[in-house]
């Protein structure tokens, strides 16, 4: 008789250490099978351990105080996990300094446990990449990371308890592509620099305690955050699908983003300081948010609105930004009022692909970027009123590009490196009562911008160019403008048809083309203009411009050496 016996092999314990068969953890992993436990004796192990098998436990015999694993290569992970259901417990883990991790859960490594470790002196302490789901991270101390203490990316269902993160560049960071990537169990037993993490899911009508070390609010409503001081986090405060909530009197510094709203509308921030962060306020698809009396100095983008309509920023200081002071992108009907954006590396205020925005009484000085203090691009029907855009270090005071139907009223553009106000490829714009004085280039320049109206503007005393220059811009109307004391012409119309100049003052020009100069500009009408007291040449100079009409103009006391007051050529 033949007997067949079947069975399951028992899980084995594999000992690693001095005097054992396996003297490195890597050797133990190579020998292990699913279900085995690798127990590591006391000592220091210099290696980079790749754990590519499923269902194994790697633990120290006597805890992290007795068992240290040091990266053999600082440019590789100390522990790299690509298997599922792996446990790493009880080690002192260090040495992965070159953008690498103490413990790295590779893409798709799930159901793991990282516990009772001391993880110090790495770039990342613990890093869980895409689809590292249902992992337990508990009772770890992570410190002195050059990058992140714990970072979790595009994963779901993870549990964090009793972890201590301190003295890391960023203590804690969590990112996701969808809301499911934020569905984790993270309680206040987790500490960042001695303060609890508040990670709230599906909570309404509640107040975050002021001792918060970092705040995440996911799918929440009517959350209040007051009087907190937060630092050294990827996000100081992060909202996802959170609405009708408020932040007040909060100080956030040295974070990646001070405040980040994703898909979170109808929220407010008041009386808060978000200085010295990667970015100050960053909102994405978050409509109807209001920000008042914010200080966000020395950040990247101090305030960035992206696809966030009807957002408002008022009475805020966004100066010394490493990028833009205020950046409005793909966001309609936004309002910026009484803000200060001084000495930003790029524009003080940049509005891009954003229609019907209103900028009122803002101050934007000393921009270093080529687009100047206030820059509008592909932003139609915007209104700029009472803004001061002066002293640009490199280019324009106000630059409006490819933005039709904009209205500029009572703005000031003084002493800019290039043009005071530059309207480029923007039709049907109206400029009224603006002041552009003492700029290095033209005071007000229209370029390829048809059907524009300039009325009551002052464009005087430009140090090296014209007061008003209309270039390749047809059907423009200039009425009651003052353009005196400019180096070149007070008003220069070039390659522009059917323009009308009425009641303008253009006097005291220093250079050869005189006070009002038309060149290659047909069918223009000049009525009631004062073009007197040219210091060197003509009052009105018409050059290669057919079918023009001049009526009731004044040209007095212009330089009369060998030149006429009025020259038709």
Image (spheres, grey):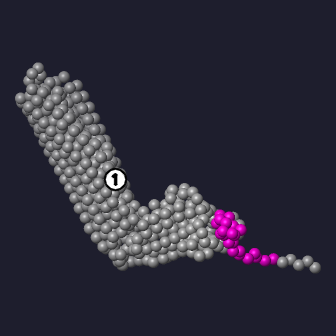
Instruction: Residue at the far top: name it.
Output: 562
Where, by quadrant of the figure, is residue 133 drawn?
bottom right
497 or 28, nearer to the observer: 28
Determine if the magenta segment contains residue 16. yes
- Quadrant where the N terminus lies? bottom right
Q: Position of residue 515 (x, y in %)?
A: 14, 32
Q: Quadrant of residue 517?
A: top left
Identify which residue is drawn at 49% across, 60% down: 123
| Residue occupied by mark 1 | 322
Tell which of 228 and 406 is nearer to you: 228
Q: Is residue 516 left or right of residue 259?
A: left
Q: Is residue 197 visible?
A: no
Residue range in magenta is 6-27
Q: Is residue 565 magenta?
A: no
* In-front residue for pair 185/456: 185
**Would residue 539 be found to the left or right of residue 203 on screen?**
left
Q: Is residue 199 positioned above or below 467 on the image?
A: below
| SS at circle 1 | loop
Note whether residue 245 is visible.
yes
Decide if residue 541 is on the left or right side of residue 14.
left
């Amino acid at each position: 008789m033949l007997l067949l016996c079947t069975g399951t092999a028992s899980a084995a314990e594999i000992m690693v250490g001095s005097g054992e068969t396996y003297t490195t953890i890597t050797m133990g992993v190579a020998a292990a099978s699913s279900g085995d436990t690798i127990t590591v004796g006391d000592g220091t192990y210099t290696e980079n351990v790749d754990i590519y098998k499923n269902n194994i436990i790697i633990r120290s015999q006597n805890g992290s105080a007795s068992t240290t694993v040091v990266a053999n290569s600082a440019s590789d992970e100390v522990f790299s996990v690509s298997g599922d259901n792996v446990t790493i417990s009880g080690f002192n883990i260090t040495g992965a300094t070159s953008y690498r991790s103490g413990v790295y859960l590779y893409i798709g490594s799930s159901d793991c446990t990282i516990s009772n470790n001391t993880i110090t002196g790495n770039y990342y302490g613990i890093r869980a990449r895409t689809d590292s789901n249902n992992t337990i991270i508990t009772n770890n101390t992570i410190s002195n990371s050059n990058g992140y203490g714990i970072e979790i990316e595009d994963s779901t269902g993870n549990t964090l308890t009793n972890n201590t993160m301190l003295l890391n560049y960023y203590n804690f960071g969590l990112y996701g592509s969808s809301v499911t990537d934020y569905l984790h169990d993270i309680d206040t037993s987790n500490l960042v620099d001695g303060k609890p993490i508040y990670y709230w899911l599906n909570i309404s009508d509640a107040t975050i305690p002021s001792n918060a070390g970092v705040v995440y609010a996911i799918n929440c409503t009517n959350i209040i955050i007051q009087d907190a001081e937060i630092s050294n986090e990827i996000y100081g405060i992060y909202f996802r699908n959170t609405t009708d909530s408020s932040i007040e009197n909060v100080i956030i510094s040295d974070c990646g983003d001070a405040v980040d709203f994703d898909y979170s509308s109808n929220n407010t921030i008041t009386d808060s300081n978000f200085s010295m962060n990667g970015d100050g306020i960053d909102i994405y698809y978050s409509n109807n948010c209001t920000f008042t009396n914010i200080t966000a100095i020395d950040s990247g983008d101090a305030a960035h609105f992206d696809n966030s309509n009807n957002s408002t920023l008022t009475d805020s200081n966004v100066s010394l930004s490493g990028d833009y002071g205020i950046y409005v992108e793909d966001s309609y009907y936004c309002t910026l009022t009484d803000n200060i954006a001084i000495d930003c590396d790029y524009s003080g205020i940049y509005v891009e692909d954003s229609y019907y925005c209103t900028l009122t009484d803002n101050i934007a000085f000393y921009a270093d970027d080529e687009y100047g203090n206030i820059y509008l691009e592909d932003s139609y029907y915007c209104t700029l009123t009472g803004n001061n855009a002066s002293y640009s270090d490199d280019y324009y005071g106000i630059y409006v590009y490819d933005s039709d139907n904009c209205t500029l009223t009572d703005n000031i553009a003084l002493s800019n490196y290039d043009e005071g106000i530059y309207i480029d490829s923007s039709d049907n714009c109206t400029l009224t009562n603006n002041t552009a004085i003492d700029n290095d280039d033209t005071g007000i320049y229209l370029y390829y911008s048809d059907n524009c109206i300039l009325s009551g503007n002052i464009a005087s005393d430009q140090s090296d160019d014209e007061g008003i220059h209309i270039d390749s811009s047809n059907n423009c109307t200039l009425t009651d403008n003052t353009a005196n004391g400019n180096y070149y012409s007070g008003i220069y119309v070039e390659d522009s048809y059917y323009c009308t100049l009425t009641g303008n003052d253009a006097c005291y020009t220093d250079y050869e083309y005189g006070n009002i100069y038309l060149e290659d500009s047909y069918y223009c009408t000049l009525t009631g203009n004062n073009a007197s007291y040219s210091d060197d040449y003509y009052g009105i100079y018409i050059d290669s411009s057919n079918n023009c009409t001049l009526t009731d103009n004044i040209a007095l006391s212009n330089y009369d050496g060998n030149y006429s007051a009025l020259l038709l050529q």
